[in-house]
Image (cartoon, helix red, strand yellow):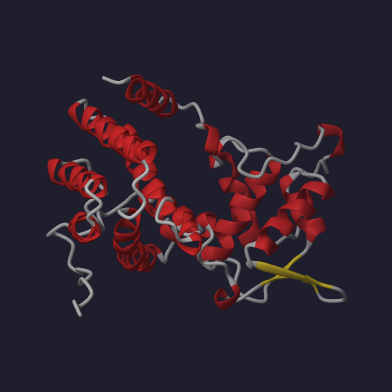
Amino acid sequence: MSTLAHTMMTAARSADSGLASPGELDRYPYAEAPAVDRVGVPAWDGGDPELGRVGRRAAGSRGRGLHGQLVQQLGQMIVSGDLGADRPLVPEEIGQRFEVSRTVVRESLRVLEAKGLVSARPNVGTRVRPVSDWNLLDPDIIEWRAFGPQRDDQRRELSELRWTIEPLAARLAAGHGREDVQQRLADMVEIMGHAMAQGDALTFSRADSEFHSLLIQVAGNRMLEHLSGIVSAALQVSGSPVTGCDRPNEASLAHHGRICDALAAGDGTAAEAAMRQLLTVHPEVERVVPAPREH
């Protein structure tokens, strides 16, 4: 096993044991407010019952700081529809309910505003925005939708988007014969093979995600490169299988290898075809995304 494969598998096991991975540590790295600055209200007397449910979910936040936890909880409630469009969000009430400072509330709402989930206007206050205003390509919103009532639509839309992005990226990447990139992609395939042999689905998933992100980044198209985060988010969304990458298997591994071979040969057509085969859905999934017509 290569040093890289050993390192990734060790890191994955650490994360699986409950330790947060680097990407999970404070996705929004704001400084946590000191305890003395918190509003010490044990319950939201007279507060909104729906926002009260948000507080009860807070314990499940994944090792994030105060800002990240609040963004996570409010974001989930908005995306799930529990906090509907045009719903007012009163910062003072949120601060009291979650026992956080005004600074934490203010910065968290700014993050949600940047994602298009809320808007803040003078004399109007902060309100939830309609779905049409959301940044649906934001990785957090992708995740929140994938684990909420819209999970089926989200996974279908992600699958369709990947069918649009990745075959083209594979074709374009074949024209950029950088040996260092080809070696890195081959390393990811090697890691996936070792992980599959050991039943390590987490390491397989991480190597798979890096493989696809790297492929898009080397396609030579800057607009496509900005979409690499969407593919990573799609691969990290768990649940029902949607594409051949969702579960470690020999066919998936073989298709990754064929993509590497096509890239090394500079064969864009073969690389595109191998990617389409990789993205073919499992037979048990009812809806199959068709390949575009050949012209």
Q: Position of residue 3 (x, y in %)?
A: 35, 19
Is residue 72 left or right of 39 when viewed as pictured?
A: left
Is residue 46 left or right of 199 when viewed as pictured?
A: right
Residue shown at the point (76%, 44%) measured from the top left: 99
Residue 201 visible, this angle: no
Q: Quadrant of the C terminus?
A: bottom left
Residue 106 visible, this angle: yes
Q: Quadrant of the N terminus?
A: top left
| Near-viewer residue (262 or 162) | 262
Q: Position of residue 31 (x, y in %)?
A: 76, 37
In the rendered view, would you say 163 is above or below 95? below
Residue shown at the point (39%, 54%) measured from the top left: 234
Residue shown at the point (79%, 59%) measured from the top left: 91
Is residue 187 left or right of 39 when viewed as pictured?
A: left
Q: Position of residue 232 (x, y in %)?
A: 42, 50
In the rendered view, would you say 96 is above or below 169? above
Q: Position of residue 13 (x, y in %)?
A: 38, 24
- In this rendering, the count of numbered labels is 0
Residue shown at the point (86%, 74%) measured from the top left: 122
In the rendered view, would you say 236 is above or below 162? above
In the rendered view, would you say 223 is above or below 133? above
| Near-viewer residue (121 or 252) | 252
